Image (tube, grey):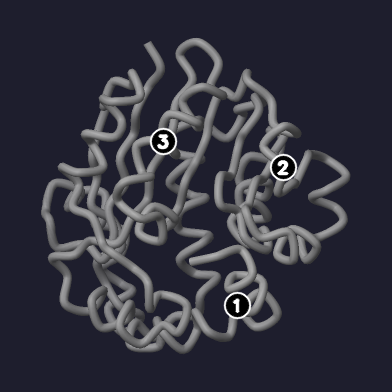
Amino acid sequence: MTPAKFDEYSTNYTQLVDQSVSISGEAAEYFSEYKARYLARLAGRDFAGRVLDYGCGVGVLSRFIKTHLPYASVDGFDVASGSIEKVLPELKKQGCFSSDLAGLRRDYQLAVIANVLHHVVPRDRQAVMAEIAGRLASRGRVVVFEHNPLNPLTQWSVKHCRFDDDAILLHPGEASRYLAGAGLKKVRRDYVVFFPKFLAWLRPAEPMLAWLPAGAQYALLGEKL
């Protein structure tokens, strides 16, 4: 998808995602905060390093990262400059949000690329991962969140999301190869987001199901050697 296409959807991004995930009973922000909580468990709430949100869009995930990692400094990059313009001013005050890669640092302790790679044509995916790896500090880590193609509800959501019409979903094995190709060691793989809202009382058990390839999405953690 071109930057102009993303800009077209930036004005009503949240509403479009809300519609596509309505089958879960949750709004779009639930899934962004879910990812931020996952990152906070990995890094620890006292984490005070630099975080890169690669493919940050209008900054929804960045906002939740800052909430759950309050001592961290969060930067964001997105190819769509119109989306960057809609990032909240308070986020821009504490970090750099840009559509220009030259504005990014090369000492991030943590980077996240959330549901971005399926918009990247397969021939370019390795280059994207290499770009992120090149901006990590020594022992820096990257978390890749992606849709799980084995989950039928995920397939339904992607099919009914207007800005996912270009999506080519990737299995964890493919994403793991991109980590290795960028010189990153795969530390863990977790399947995440199992239960819809009407089964919310079961959600505390989700971390124990991380091995089960039935989650709506998956998370890969890589570390720079």
Pointer 2 with pointer 3, Cβ within 8 A: no
Q: Nearer the viewer, mark 1 or mark 3?
A: 3
Categorize mark 2 by other alpha carbons within 10 Å: few (<14), some (14-19), many (20+): few
**Could you tell me the amino acid type at mark 2?**
Asp
Real-space Cα separation, disc 1 to disc 3, in angstroms: 26 Å
Disc 2 or 3, which lies upstream in sequence?
2
Q: Quadrant of residue 174?
A: top left
The quarter in which the C terminus is drawn is top left
At mark 2, the secondary structure is loop
Q: Which residue is mark 1?
A: 13
Across and down, in percent, residue 117 comes to: 38, 52
| Left or right of residue 189, residue 221 in this image | right
Disc 2 or 1, which lies upstream in sequence?
1
Real-space Cα separation, disc 2 to disc 1, in angstroms: 21 Å
Q: Image height check: is 100 above or below 21?
A: above
Please tell me which residue is depicted at 26% across the width and 49% down the height of the picture.
207
Categorize mark 3 by other alpha carbons within 10 Å: few (<14), some (14-19), many (20+): some
Please tell me which residue is depicted at 25% across the width and 56% down the height of the picture.
206
At mark 1, the secondary structure is helix
